[in-house]
Image (cartoon, helix red, strand yellow):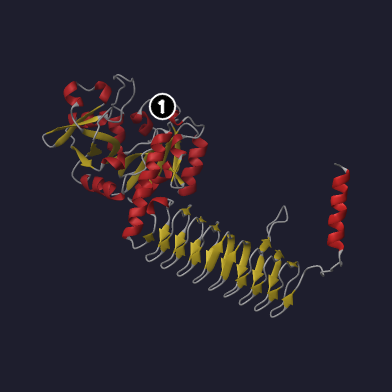
Amino acid sequence: MATALIILGAGMGTRMNSDRPKVLHDIAGAPMLVHAMKAGGALDPARTVIVAGHGADAVARAAQDYDPDAVIVLQDEQLGTAHAVAQARDALAGFDGDAIVLYGDTPFITPETLAAMAAARLTHDIVVLGFDATDPARYGRLILKDDQLDRIVEFKDATADERAVTLCNSGVVAANAATLFALIDKVNNDNAAGEYYLTDIVGIARAQGLRATVVQCDEAETRGINSRAELAMAEAQFQARARSTAQDDGVTLTAPETVFFAHDTVIGRDSIIAPNVVFGPGVTVESGATILAFSHLEGCHVSRGAVVGPFARLRPGAELAEGVKVGNFVEIKNAQIAEGAKVNHLTYIGDADIGARTNIGAGTITCNYDGVFKHKTVIGADAFIGSNTMLVAPVSVGDSAMTGSGSVITSDVPAGDLAIGRARQVNKPGLARRLIQKLRDLKARKG
């Protein structure tokens, strides 16, 4: 059975106190909306529809950056969850399959839970995701009757007995798409809030003789994000789970609570991650690599046996081959570092190719930007770049070539050559003492 995702993301998120749409606030380097899309992606959806409202253009960009095929529909007025889902009707015209309703501000629904809902759909017309709440607070209650979900009651409309129920509604619903929209057509806003509740479809379905059930999940999966404090709690929840997963996968975290992962970080087993390492989006670290303390990585690839840090920064496009060493206070961006090369100290390598076993001396800079364009530096294998070399791109240094310390290299260096690009040193006998005395005398006269 084909599946379509309907992800609700129209809310303003007033409690966030932000100009940014609520669903675009980041957790682990990705908008909450993307987390919801990733979760739904486990069902291999045939279509994904995002219901946007506040900041719709920004929501559309974020959604389509992740999935270019995602369809964006607008909810101009926020009249309730049933009204929001109804906006997806035209986008799913002619779709013969199931629809599952997710929420852009509920980012932690797991693939296993969604798979359980899909399985339950084989025997029930409506499947609702529920959880046993520690503190039911103002959640909607799931009311069961004869082993079936009989209705969902919003807190505002619940009786005292109904409020005593601890089985609560997450809002996530699965049903045949045509059935879902037919049920929504019968929803009214005769309730305390004057809204069109998606939850009302259960009672309507049961009155028509349709079957409804509940799939339960851990309460943590259903956490909705409505404030900055809840956003911070969600980040902590994600990081705790990511750290635990990494350790289960054979990664050593010497101080787990200080390591921060992105939503898509991949680390191979037997890698070692030292304290205070931060992974931005798009990082892959192969097995047996070591990332030392206070390093920051994003958009890069680190191969087996490489050592990075401490205090290193790998930016997007950094590609480290096996056995590469990148040391303290080194920044690498959009550069390929070949097997066994060393970039150990106080160096910037940007827009460059560095050959195998080449040694880059301390303080080296590839001068890649002329104020308008970026230019490339190419260094061959087994080269030795002296400390404090400025490589003014575009420029190349051949295999087994060398540069003298303190050189400014503006022309290509052939293989095997030594390039020295600095002014000749001249010593002026006694001039230092005379100059200092002159300056002291001047200072004395000025009082």
Q: Residue at x 65, y 63 (%)?
A: 363
Residue plotted at (69% across, 70% down): 396
Query: Viewer-proximal residue, 202 or 310?
Result: 310
Q: Callout 1, which amino acid?
A: Gln
Q: Nearer the viewer, residue 417 or 26?
A: 417
Residue bearing the label numbered 1? 78
Measuring from the top left, give residue 205's x and y in whole percent: 21, 32
Residue 217 screen position, x and y as percent: 24, 43
**Picture coordinates of residue 407 (x, y %)?**
74, 68
Quadrant of the frame with the C terminus: top right
- Seen as rendered, the residue at the extreme left is 146
Name the residue: 45% across, 62% down: 285
Residue 229 vs 433, above or below: the answer is: above
Give the structural element (helix, strand or loop) at label 1: loop
Q: Is residue 108 left or right of residue 393?
A: left
Identify whether 300 is placed above or below 411. Answer: above
What is the count of numbered marks?
A: 1
